[in-house]
Image: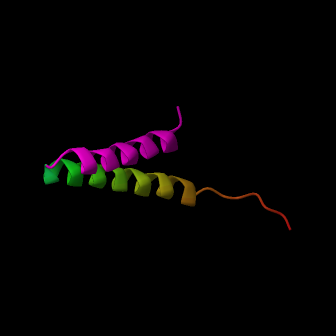
Amino acid sequence: MRVDTLIFGLLLACALVVILVRTRWIVLTMFFVGFVAVGLLFMHHVTSVLDLSF
């Protein structure tokens, strides 16, 4: 399974928790974990060299 699929699932779960759970710290923790995961995935891909020739 790809990492971006897992991150999308985490953000979807966070959205469901916003709707179903009234505890704010759970929502904020899940959102922060998702935000950090997206940032780490971005940092991994931003350092990749694109082999483009125009």
The image shows residue 39 at horizontal and vertical percentages of: 42, 57
Name the image colouring. Answer: rainbow
Closer to us: 48 or 42: 42
Left or right of residue 36: residue 18: left
Q: Residue at x 39, y 50 (%)?
A: 37
Residue at 52 percent across and 31 percent down: it is 1
Residue placed furthest toward the right: 54
- Quarter of the image for the C terminus: give it: bottom right
Q: Residue at x 51, y 53 (%)?
A: 44
Magenta residues?
1-22
20 within the magenta span? yes
Q: x, y (%) of residue 20?
A: 23, 44
Q: Residue at x 43, y 54 (%)?
A: 38
Quarter of the image where one finds residue 49: bottom right
Q: Nearer the viewer, residue 36 or 11?
A: 11
Check if residue 15 falls in the magenta segment: yes
